[in-house]
Structures are given as structure tokens and as C-alpha cells.
Image (tube, rainbow, N blue to C red):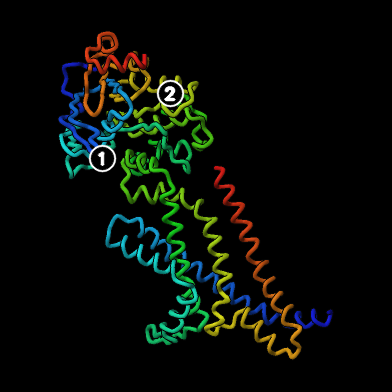
Amino acid sequence: MSFSPDSQPLITLRGVRKSFGAYEVLRGIDMDIRKGEVVAIIGPSGSGKSTILRTINGLTPINAGTIAVGEIMVSDPKLDQVKLRHRVGMVFQQYNLFPHKSVLENVAMAPIQVLKQPRPQVEERARKLLAEMRLPDKAGAYPGELSGGQQQRVAIARALCMEPEVILFDEVTAALDPEMVKEVLAAVRKVAEDGMTCILVTHEMGFAREAADHVYFTDRGVIVEHAPPAEFFTRASDARTKEFLSKVL
Amino acid sequence: MPHLVTQVLEWMPFVLNGFGLNILMSLLAIVAGTAMGTFLGLGQISRLRLVGVPSRIATQLFRNAPWLVLLFYCIFLMPYQIRVAGQVIVLPSWLRATIGFSFPVAANFSEIVRGAVISVPSGQWEAAQALGYGRKATLFRIILPQCIARMIPPWMNLYALLLTATPLSVIVGVEEALGRTQAAVQAQSDSSVLIPMYLALLGMFFFYTWPINRLSLVLERRFRTK
């Protein structure tokens, strides 16, 4: 779509391993993601999809391997957390909006408090983003007054307001009622079409097929195969991928 | 019967004066205890062992000790007067008792703070972290503001408990409502005044504490449904 396949990758994972106690969740993950690319990670539950996302913005520290976002080494123990989180935004399955803050404050507070940007400028940007998320009249509302789909769109606006280069979407529609899935997917799609680099963990196969430039399939902590969606969904080569696809499609 | 009522009423200003001291002690102790308890509670969730371990020990120690024993400690271990910048300040026994009460209040409030902080879903910490907030900024800007509403009902309960514990100070010679009731009963040659006098004392505590308990129940219900 909007990325050039030959450019330098923006995000690189090499041999990433992660264990929780004796259980090895990630057993050597390699990925290259270019600027503007939309990547979908799919796979059975417990295969480590969400953990991959969480290692990219440093929420989950890794045991071995390297992760680089631009020139930032995420796996470096002396990592500048603020710098990384400025570049990598995240949207969660459970939205995780701050319930004691209004919608506008939820969207604007981090750029003001963490990035020390001037309030009027940030609030103007936040209002614009809320309008783009089709929530222009909800700025003064509190998260508890909104539907799940509306809350998730606020969470997307909150991630965008940090002006990141990449946004990680962690099963953003999994907690939603079916009638709200569409509106949130439309919002994600808009973010992707505006040129944002997006990494999505998703169970929405139709969405992965339409919106992604590249699909990764994970199983038991490894990437089994990856390909552009047209190829992936029609000519999957690995037996595990075939089995998974036969279950979900 | 009317004779008894007039007798009790005659003593009421005297006893109510003492009850004023119960209220004063409870108010000072809740303020001091809440302040100390806030530090202890935040200390308990600290990741620094040097802060966390002493805070947890102090909390457990003062929370599991009988209030009366702590009271005795404060009354007998604390000096009767202190010298600050050449000035001699006398610490009356009611003030020392107040300090004694503030220790168990601090320990209980410490647990209220810790409980409120861990009751906030971990997703709030993660979302804040993903937006670049450090641990301290997350705690003060995002977690604690959500805790205050949750802490109010147990805090009011703690205050009601504290007030009903203040008559313990009669044992160490504080002239509060219970002490004054005892004195009044003894001063009266007629022993039939005993029961109505103590009833009046119970009434005082009840009508002061009951509305507080009702209010905390109402608040608890409101915060739960949210």
C-alpha cells in the first residue's frame, strides 16, 4: 500500500525469546516491519501473539535476542522509556481508559504531562483526533458513559495524540459486542490508510485479509510462516497454518 | 422517675464537656493517623526493600497490637513535657493518649491505602506505562486519584471505630466522657442514677457515630455500583 518494500525496516526483531517461569512463550522470533506497513499477527490463543506486541514497546522485557525501533534498542537495559513510548503507541483489548478523566483529558494528558507539549496545541490536536474518530461531541464525557466501541475509539485517539510512528493494536475488538466491532475496525483502517505503521494482533481474519500488507502466523512461540494476505489465505504451505485456517475461516 | 431525669440532666453539661474531649482526641488522631498511614501505605507498595520492609513491619505491628497496649506505651514512654527551642511544652495525658490512638489508626489506614492501590486494575498501570509515564507519575497522577473514592468508606468506618475506642483513655487518667460519667455516678448518693447515666453516655456515642456509619454505607454502595 503506502510503504516501499525495499526501504530499511523500521522495526526489527531478531531471535527474541521470552519465558514466564519455566514456560517459554517466545522461542526465537524474527520480524522486519517497514514504515507505513500494516502487519497482522494471527494464530491460536496462547501462541505468543500478544507477548510479541508487548515486547516491542518494552512492556514485557525479553530474555534473549534484540529488538530495534528505528535507532532505539528496546532490549538495551539503559533504554529511554519516554523516547520509546513517544514512538510506539498501543491500544489494548480492554481499552484501559482512565475512568477519572474526561475523554479530552484521556487523549491530551500524556502529550502534556510526559512530552511537555503546550496544552492549547495538544488539546486542539486531541479535538481534531476525536472528530476523526467520529466522537466530536464526547470530549467532556467520562469513559464510563461511553459504549465499548466509543471507548476503544477514544483509546485509538489517545495513542494517536502522542504522534507515534507505530501503533500496536492488541486484539482491540475482542472485548466488544458484535455490533461495535465494525466501527472500531473502520477506525483502525482509517489510521492505517493515513500511513501509520500498524501491528495488529487480531482474530478478525476478514480484516487481516483486507487491511494488512503482511500476515504473520504464530504457533507455540514461533513464527510458522508469513506472507502477503492474498498468498497467505489461499496458499498456506505449513500444516499448522492450514489447520488453523480451516478452523477460523 | 422525673426526679431521675432531672438528676441526669443536671450532670449532662459536665459529661458532654468530657465527650467534647473524646471528639477532639478522635479528630486529632484521625488526622495524624491518616497522614502517617498514607506514608506507611505508600511505603508498603514501594519497590525499594529499604522502604517496603519497614513499612510492612510497622503496619503489621501496630495493626495487630491491642489499642490499649499501644495507649499504655505512649502514656508511659512519652515524656510529660518536651523542650522546644528553650520553651517547655507540657504534654497533657489526653494529648499523649491521642498520639497513642494515632498509631493503630495509621496502621489500619496504611492497609486501606495498600488495598485501594492494588484494587485498581493492572491495565491502568500498563496503559500509563505505554503512554510514557514512569512508575511514580503513574501512581500519583493515575492510580491514587482513582483510589480516593474507594478509600472514603473504609476511612469513615475507621473513624467510627476510633471514636468508640477513645473511652479507653479513662484507664490512663484522661477526663473524658466515661471518666466523667463514673465521677458523676460516684458523686450521687442515689445508686438508681447509675443505669440512666450510662444510658445517656451510650446515647451520646450512638448519635454521634451512627450517622457516620450510615453515610459510609451509602457511599460504599454508590462507589460499588460505579
Q: Position of residue A4 (x, y in %)?
A: 20, 16
The kind of secondary structure element at disc 1 is: strand
Task: Identify which amino acid the numbered label 1 is placed on.
Answer: Phe
- In this image, A124 relative to B135: left or right? right
Which residue is at the front of the view, A174 or B102? A174
Q: What chain does mark 2 sit on?
A: A
Q: What chain does mark 1 sit on?
A: A
The circle drawn on residue A184 is 2
Q: Position of residue B71 (x, y in %)?
A: 47, 77
Q: Earlier in the sequence, mark 1 or mark 2?
A: 1
Please name the residue that numbered disc 1 is placed on: A20
Q: Residue at x 18, y 24 (%)?
A: A9
10 Å neighbourhood of mark 2: few (<14), some, or many (≥20)?
Answer: many
Residue A125 appears in the rendering: no
Task: Identify which amino acid the numbered label 2 is placed on.
Answer: Val
For residue A228, which quarter of the picture?
top left
